[in-house]
Amino acid sequence: MEGTWKILENNEIILRKADPEDLDFLYSVENNPNLWFISDTKAPFSKWQIRQHIENSVYDIYTSKELRLIIESKESKKSLGIIDLFEFDPFNMRAGIGIVVCQEYQNMNIATGALGLVIDYAFSVLNLLQLWCNIDENNITSINLFSAKFGFERTGVLKKWKKDGGNFYDVFVFQLFNKKLL
């Protein structure tokens, strides 16, 4: 098992499950209204709710159908962001993927490193056929990360899918296939 988790680290970061000590960090990320449009959240979470999520996330991805990992700096041990596999479907061999890096750590290749590690984990350990994500049309940074850097293909458009203020926005569907299984 030790070798499995080594795939979730590189020279700069380690991806790990949340601990009770992460409560304040998760509380600040989940309750950041600037991220609510991206995550489809419309209301804040209480510390009790987040604590319950941490305590109940001891189950593996096959039980909970999700894997939420803290992106942590190996050098400073600071939490830099969160990366998730969600809607895990082992029968159809797919999962959704999402990532958020705290603003002060953006443009430092943290997202690139974390996404690369999770893609490797999903394809080599979980043996998934595909990963998918939905990205808002105006989120050019994420579009470039997923498509230009990792080869996610835009395979669909959800028209007028999200409302922000008085405007509706399209959401692009991206997929990445495990070439070893095709």
Image (cartoon, grey):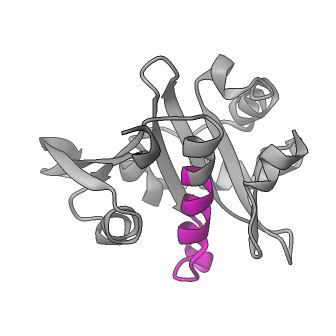
- Name the residue at 74% across, 29% down: 57
Counting from the top left corner in percent of width and height, residue 56 is at 76, 24
Q: Which residue is rendered at x = 86% and y = 76% of the image? A: 76
Instruction: Residue 9: name its quadrant.
Output: bottom right
User: Which image quarter is the C terminus in?
Assistant: top left
Please state if 127 lies on the left or on the right of 159 as rendered. Answer: right
Residue 46 on the magenta span = no
Q: Quadrant of the N terminus?
A: top right
Residue 111, x across and y down, in percent: 55, 67
Work out whether 131 lies above or below 11: above
Q: Position of residue 154 (x, y in %)?
A: 21, 53
Q: Is residue 120 above or below residue 149?
A: above
Q: Main secondary structure of the magenta part?
A: helix
Q: Is residue 115 magenta?
A: yes
**Residue situated in front as seen by the camera: 182 or 48:** 182
Left or right of 117 on screen, residue 128: left
Front residue of this view, candidates 116 and 40: 116
What residue is shown at x 38% (from left), y 62% (from top)? 146
Give the percent coordinates (x, y) of residue 172: 22, 50
Magenta span of residues: 101-119
**Outermost residue toward the left?**
159
- Whether residue 164 is visible: no
Can the viewer see residue 69 in this picture?
A: yes
Query: How many numbered marks does the figure carry?
Result: 0
Above or below — where is 49 with respect to 12?
A: above
Residue lying at 52% horizontally and 27% vertically, measured from the top left = 88
**Viewer-nearest residue: 140 or 162:** 140
The residue positioned farthest toward the bottom in the image shown: 108
Task: Judge left or right: residue 2 versus residue 179.
Answer: right
